[in-house]
Image (cartoon, helix red, strand yellow):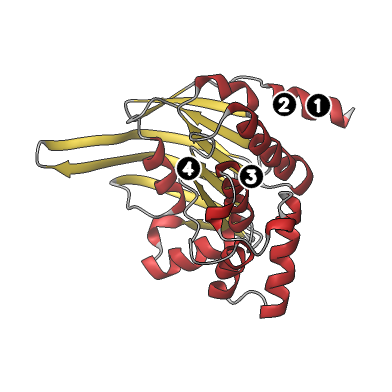
């Protein structure tokens, strides 16, 4: 049996608050294979963002382990130092937020070249060429020199996806990326995600509160009160991929 790309083993997270301990995640177990589009659906406060922060190593877990089989090595994310995790994240994982988090004083192309420059993966001329290719991927190359304030929310989210792809990570994690978008724009974002999985072999883990989106993932789970429920279903995305292979 092959080693999963991502594996969560009995992951728990408890926050200490003035009102007492709050359990955000409780013994979560999850295996994600390379090339999957996995959705985690849950209400606000269910622990969805905390789950992603355990996977990307932004937050420390209380117990358990997160392992990633990356670049030929099986690593335990939370056994690395903070600097090592930051370096790994910059090279191997793209993060997409609901609020886009584009830098307002930088143009779209500059927002995308920034992570490449920070990781020192490309020479300046190469990073700009790659940024333009990524803007073309999300159909925004004509807006490359605009500031984020001069494009729509849906366009900003597509720029955020392009930025997350800057260093060609194998894994993308998306935190409510369609939560503030209308249904038509959200469909376009999903089209981009499905293209990244089916045509580029990316692995995507997305959390959302929208139960109606469950059928669009290759697998989906429900997160409730910090517990990951066994609610995997065959989806429209699965059936589409099977038809394409035929």
Foreground mark, 4 or 1, reads 4
- The dot on residue 203 is 3
Residue at x-position 59% and y-position 68%? 110
Residue that badge 2 annotates: 238
Residue at horizontal 66 percent and vertical 60 percent from the top = 168
* Direction from residue 10 to residue 2 in the image, left or right: right
Badge 3 crowding class, 10 Å Cα cut-off, few under 14, some 14 to 19, many 20 or more, is many
Q: Is residue 1 left or right of residue 206?
A: right
Q: Which of labels 2 and 4 is toward the front? A: 4
Query: Is residue 14 left or right of 2 when viewed as pictured?
Result: left
Crowding around mark 1 (Cα neighbors within 10 Å: few <14, some 14 to 19, many 20+) is: few
- Dots 1, 2 in contact, CB < 8 A: yes
Judge from the rendering whether residue 221 lies leftward or rightward of residue 109; answer left or right: left
Label 2: which secondary element: helix
Q: Residue furthest right?
A: 246
Residue 123 visible in rendering: no
Q: CA distance from mark 1 to mark 2?
A: 6 Å
Q: Which mark is residue 98?
A: 4
Mark before the other along the chain sequence, 2 or 3:
3
Q: Secondary structure at mark 1?
A: helix
| Cα–Cα gap, marks 3 and 4 | 19 Å
Location of the N terminus (image quadrant): top right
Sequence-earlier tag: 2 or 4 = 4
Quadrant position of residue 80: bottom left
Residue 62 x %, y %: 28, 46
Label at residue 242: 1
Instruction: Give SS at disc 3.
Output: strand
């Amino acid at each position: 049996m092959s080693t999963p790309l991502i594996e969560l083993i009995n992951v728990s997270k408890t926050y200490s608050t003035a009102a007492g301990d709050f359990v955000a995640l409780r013994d979560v177990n999850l295996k994600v294979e390379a090339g999957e589009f996995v959705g985690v659906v849950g209400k606000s406060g269910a622990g969805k963002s905390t789950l992603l922060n355990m996977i990307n190593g932004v937050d420390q877990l209380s117990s358990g382990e997160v392992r990633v089989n990356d670049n030929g090595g099986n690593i335990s994310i939370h056994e690395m130092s903070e600097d090592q995790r930051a370096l790994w994240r910059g090279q191997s994982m793209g993060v997409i937020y609901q609020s886009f988090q584009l830098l307002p004083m930088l143009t779209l192309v500059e927002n995308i070249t920034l992570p490449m420059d920070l990781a020192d993966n490309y020479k300046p001329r190469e990073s700009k060429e790659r940024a333009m290719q990524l803007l073309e991927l999300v159909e925004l190359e004509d807006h490359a020199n605009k500031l984020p304030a001069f494009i729509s929310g849906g366009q900003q989210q597509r720029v955020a996806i392009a930025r997350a792809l800057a260093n060609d990570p194998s894994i993308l994690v998306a935190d409510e990326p369609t939560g503030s978008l209308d249904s038509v724009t959200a469909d376009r974002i999903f089209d981009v995600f499905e293209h990244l999985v089916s045509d580029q072999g990316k692995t995507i883990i997305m959390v959302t509160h929208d139960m109606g989106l469950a059928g669009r993932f290759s697998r989906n789970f429900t997160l409730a009160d910090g517990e990951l429920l066994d609610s995997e279903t065959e989806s429209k995305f699965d059936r589409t991929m099977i038809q394409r292979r035929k």
